[in-house]
Image (tube, rainbow, N blue to C red):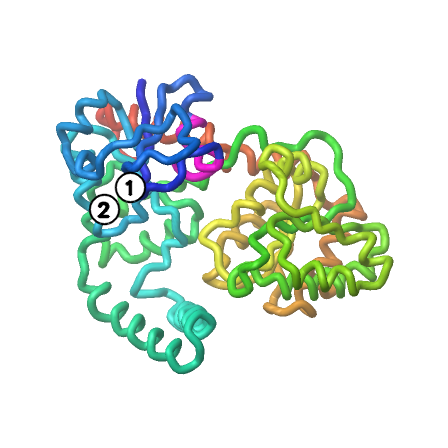
Amino acid sequence: MKWYTCTPVSFKGDHTFFSRDSGAFCKAFQRIGVESRAIMPTPVQENDEPDLIRTEYANLEDPVWWKSLGIDGLILYGWGMGKYLPIARAIHEAGIFLVVYMDSSGLFFPWQYWLPIAENMYTKDVFTHGKIKGSAFFLLRLLKQHTWNLASRGRRKHLDSGDMVAFPIPAALQSVADRQWLYGKSIVRKLALVPNPISSTCRFAGEKRNIILAVGRWDDLLYKRPYLLMATLQQALPHAPHWEAEIYGNIPAFLREWHGNLPEDLRNRIHLAGYIPNIELQKKQSLARISLCTSLSEGTHLASAEALCAGASVVGPRLTPQLNCLQWYVSHDSGTLSPQDSPESLAGCYVLIEALRAWDSGKRNPQEISRYWCSLLHAENSCKRIIAAYEAAQSGKTGI
């Protein structure tokens, strides 16, 4: 059996590509004994790994080229975008079982949560372009969403080209299922939950310490919100003297300055660890008890998903629908969400401090958290479910 993956954008094809998204699915297929390679368009880039096939973009729209590969199935990371419809059609015409993978929150127009999504758009545009230009950009985007994007059938045709339409979180899948009137029964019947791939090396190793872990691109002031992270830790840790925090990712100068100005006790218990290789980060996640997310919006939050597989619980703000993934992540007695999006609420008695107390009192079970989420999130398990759907389709059975 041969299952490939395809990303129709020329990203780097080094080890980082193969540690997540379509590259991670490729490696997971290999680990369960299925021949697999990843496909991206040219040009060839430095440090491309041997498991990557680079080809001219025109080949991706050619059914004959796809047929020449002799593969059984393919996961297409095309985000359901209309401009990649010719690729999806070519794969379908080649007789290949196509999984259209929607690496997104699924919150397409018409929105179920119109106001918070519009507010999120406005915040982004003003942050990027300033008050006057940002407001104009926002109004233009809003107009486009209500006219061209609503009328466009590109996404629907893209989804309908697949044999399976996969979304990474239940809320994303449900947002399309609830709009059968727009997407049609054909697409809704193909919907399947396929979480973003987490490596099977990410699991609980047997030991936990009183560590709060935070992972992110901390120079991203808008979406990763380092100032919320800083304020939350500064308010919570004085109430938990036996706990420490470790911050991973890029550490900008303002974060170092904040850390240097902390009282000595907090400075000694908050560690700016910076970048480390992913395999080393997984070891840190296995030791940590809590993964703290301060993001404004995430389709899925990879660091939280990895932490769950490592037996940690998740803490973050309850932002519907921008952070629907966190509401799923805490659903198996595996985390706590803040009712309000503020450091006072996130650090307060019912959130981070309460999460610390839950661990201190033995209410959290790292073995069970890890067992449950590994079964759902490990890429190998997702690959097995995809292959089972393919085999069911080959035998004439209906349903995903």
Asked if residue 343 lies in the magenta stretch, the reply is no
From what the image shows, is residue 182 above or below residue 93? below
The answer to which quarter of the image holds residue 25 is top left
**Badges 2 and 1: C-beta atoms under 8 Å apart?**
yes
The answer to which quarter of the image holds residue 309 is top right
Q: Can you give x and y, in whole percent of width and height, for residue 164 in the image?
A: 29, 38
Query: In this view of the protein, can residue 73 be seen by the observer?
Result: yes
Q: From the image, tell me which residue sits under label 1.
A: 8
Q: Earlier in the sequence, mark 2 or mark 1?
A: 1
Q: Nearer the viewer, mark 2 or mark 1?
A: 1
Q: Can you give x and y, in whole percent of width and height, for residue 388 in the image?
A: 35, 26
Secondary structure of the residue carrying tag 1 is loop
Magenta segment main secondary structure: helix
- The CA distance from mark 2 to mark 1 is 8 Å
Q: Can you give x and y, in whole percent of width and height, for residue 346 in the image?
A: 66, 64
Q: Can you give x and y, in whole percent of width and height, for residue 141 in the image?
A: 30, 70
Give the residue drawn at x 65%, y 60%.
253
Q: From the image, tell me which residue sits under label 2.
A: 84
Span colored in magenta: 16-28
The answer to which quarter of the image holds residue 136 is bottom left
